[in-house]
Image (tube, rainbow, N blue to C red):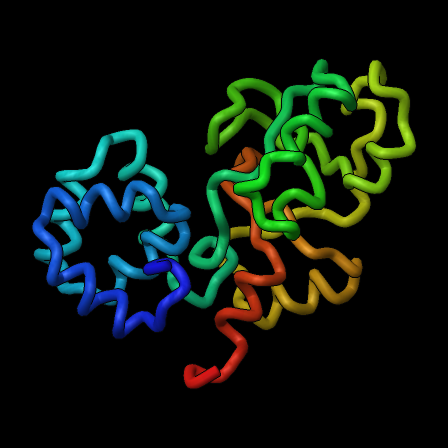
Amino acid sequence: VLQEMEEDDQVILLSALEDERAADVLEAMDDDDAADLLGEMSTADQQRLLELMEPEDAEPVRRLMSYDDTTAGGMMTSEPVILLPDATVAEALALVRNPELSPAIAAQVYVVRPPQATPTGKFLGTAHLQRLLREPPSALVSGVVEKDTGALRPNLTIEEVTRHLATYNLVAAPVVDDHDRLIGAVSVDDVLDHLLPAVW
C-alpha cells in the first residue's frame, strides 16, 4: 500500500514509524520505489535507514540513489528476470510466472554471462515472452536472444528512454554500464510514473 501512495504521504507515514520498522518496510518495497522514497527524505534520515536495512537490500537501493531520478539509472529496477545462456526456455517461463513481477518486467528475460546478480557479467541479449512461448521447453535461451533493440545507458534522459521504448515497441529495456554489464531494466510503467502530472 505504501508503495502506491503519493510520495509526500509515503514520507509522512514512514517518518511516523520506528526506525527498525521503517527499514523493514523499505526492504519489502521494490528497490526502485525504496530509492525514490528515500530520495524525498533528508540525507541524515537516508543514511540512518540504509544502515538499518539488510546489506543485500540496501546495496541496490544505494546504487539506484546514485543516479538522477529522471535518467534510465534512476528509473530502473535492479531486479529484472536474469538468466545465464545455458538456461532452458522452461526455466525462463517458470521465472516469469512469478505473480510478484509486474507485467512489464515479466515480458522478457535478460541473458547474461556470469555472475547473474546485478551488476552482471556481459549482457548478451533479451528473450521476449512471446518468442519463448513459441520454442520447445528444452531449448536454450541463448538460442532465442535478440540484440537488435540495443540497451540503454544509465545516464540517458527520460526523453531518450521514452523514444527508445516507442521506437522498438518495448514495455521494458535493459540498462547496461560502460562494460556492457546489465545493471537493471527500465519498464514503461516506471517511465509513465515520471511523465504523468504529479496530481494524477
Q: Residue at x 26, y 74 (%)?
A: 8
Report which quarter residue 139 is drawn in: top right
Is any part of residue 68 visible from this angle?
Answer: yes
Judging depth in this view, the residue of 72 and 103 nearest the camera is 103
**Does residue 136 appear to the left or right of 196 in the view shown?**
right
Residue at 81% across, 45% down:
148
Residue 71 at x, y percent in the picture:
48, 62
Whole-percent x and y of residue 19?
A: 10, 48
> What residue is shown at x 38% (from left), y 62% (from top)?
68
Q: Position of residue 44 (x, y in %)?
A: 8, 56
Figure quadrant of the N terminus = bottom left
Q: Is residue 179 above or below residue 19?
A: above
User: Residue 195, image x and y in percent?
Assistant: 53, 76
Q: Can residue 178 be seen by looking at this rendering?
A: no
Q: How many marks?
A: 0
13 is higher (above) or lower (below) than 122: below
User: Residue at left 67%, top 29%?
Assistant: 111
In the figure, 16 relative to 59: above or below?
below
